[in-house]
Image (tube, helix red, strand yellow):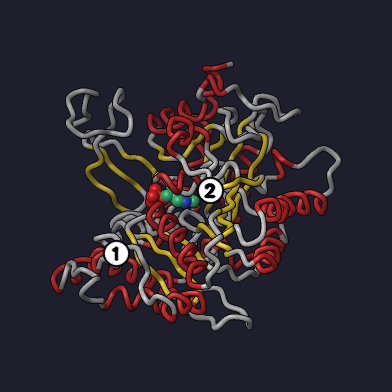
Amino acid sequence: MAQTPNSSRVFHRTLNTSFPQATLAKGVYITDSTGKQYLDGSGGAAVSCLGHGHPYVIDAIKQQLDHMAFAHTSFFTNTPAEELAEKLSQEAPKNKHTSGNWRTYFVSGGSEANETAFKMARQIMFERGETSRSHFIARQQSYHGGTIATMSAGGRAASRDLYEPLLSTNFEKIMPCFPFRWQNEGESDEAFLARSTGELETMIENLGDKRVIGFIAETVSGATLGAVPPVKGYFKEIRRICDKHGVLMIMDEVMAGMGRCGKLFAIDEEGVVPDMITLAKGLGGGYQPLGAVMVREELAQEIEDGSGAFVHGHTYVGHATACAAGVAVQRVFEETGIIEQVAVKGDILAGKLIEAFGDHPHVGDLRGRGFFRGIELVKDRETNEPFDGKHGLAMKIKKAAMDEGLICYPMGGTADGTVYGPNGDHVMLAPPFIYTENHMDELIEKLGRAIDGSIAGIL
Ligand SMILES: Cc1ncc(COP(=O)(O)O)c(C=O)c1O
């Protein structure tokens, strides 16, 4: 039964609305307690990569529970954590300048992963004796999590504003790599690339010698911008700048990784080996809360050869049942070749989106990679002027889509070039990898009605 706003004792995300109660989830559909079905068009928030109720993953979790649910990692290691770390190390980006091996620290979600990455990066600098390094550089219009440090790194005004007095000022921001909104009129692609990467070098130099620990960015920008891939060559240049200044390059692949963009690691498309990669969402596929920080072996070795212990920890680090789910998800990836299918099906979905929305009077941009797609809505297609944030268009579309029986991921604040500002709207799509063309058609039909009805309501 749907809860009325004040009959529930759960502290929900919004306290003045009621949520349908999800009771069953199978394949690409979630059913609520009234029997209404919702097509999952965004994997929740880019989580349910294998869809819902996958028998192999469920069976693996049950088997792990029968053996051992949990043993605290200050006393023991466990088989699923070891196996998953080994598998990720084998698959992670490599080149001839690195050992090719990675170590993985398992946590329970994306915020914990990024929080852990910041501390690990700082400790690596400590081991080097570079204790003056105290700052991170991140990007405007980014999201790295909901904890104080990850929000400090993030540039999403709607998440930050209320908490601004609590946030750390040790996280500086450069511009995002988002040509649709940030490329100046008449600016060439080369000049845009130089400007967007040049900001990093300038920021590092302005902060001063041995002041910056690391640079963090979403490989493909997720919920804040709506699936924006980097321009070609962007991360290669970022890598060069990081190397020149002894700054660690941290890729946040919490959303974009684990096959979402058609490769296990989204950064593989860029031909670059970062120093750290953070993961969550698709790593556990929604079957268990699981996140991870991957770090190149050479860097982990610096802590091993130095103090020997990482000064950090959470109770559920390396949780055996969560890692068992992660192992099962990796096995499904490997045995079914489903990630290669994402690359192919992603192009089909992109084609269908162009067909449906390419000439839409209020669609300014269609973008993305693989099964990570964004539709940016504009008031005026000639000028790309966004809808005023006061309309809350994104949230109207989210509700209209739910009424239609569709789960998608709309978000406001897309267009503002500054850290602060609520203008602009997009819809992000991140379907489960098991989608067929029929599912794509159903998604587009329902989404089209939700978008058109919501825009008609504010014009
Ligand atoms: C890119 C990115 N990083 C970090 C996070 C935080 O992950 P979590 O919500 O699991 O803490 C998110 C969540 O949406 C994300 O999209």
Q: What x and y, as percent, mark residue 49?
A: 41, 57
Mark 2 residue type: Asn
Indicate the secondary structure of the residue bearing disc 1.
loop
Please report contact status of discs 1 and 2: CB closer than 8 Å, yes or no: no
Disc 1: residue Cβ within 8 A of ligand 1's nearest atom: no
- Relative to the observer, which residue lies in front, 133 or 33? 133
Point 66% across, 60% down: residue: 209
Q: Residues within 10 Å of mark 2 (few under 14, many from 20)?
A: some
- Relative to the observer, which residue lies in front, 204 or 261? 204
Point 52% across, 25% down: residue: 393
Mark 1 residue type: Val
Q: Up-down: is 341 above or below 175?
A: below
- Relative to the observer, which residue lies in front, 196 or 373? 196
Image quarter of the C terminus: top right
Q: What x and y, as percent, mark residue 28?
A: 37, 50
The alpha-carbon separation of the residues under discs 1 and 2 comes to 26 Å
| Circle on res. 317 | 1
Q: Is residue 294 visible?
A: yes
Q: What x and y, as percent, mark residue 347?
A: 60, 56
Image quarter of the N terminus: top left
Q: What x and y, as percent, mark residue 270?
A: 65, 65
Indicate the secondary structure of the residue bearing disc 2.
loop
Q: Which residue is mark 2?
A: 170
- Relative to the observer, which residue lies in front, 230 or 134? 134
Give the number of callouts.
2
* Of marks 1 and 2, the one in the foreground: 2
Q: Quadrant of residue 318?
A: bottom left
Q: Up-down: is 136 above or below 455?
A: below
Q: Residues within 10 Å of mark 1 (few under 14, many from 20)?
A: many
Point 63% across, 53% down: residue: 229
Q: Is residue 446 visible?
A: no
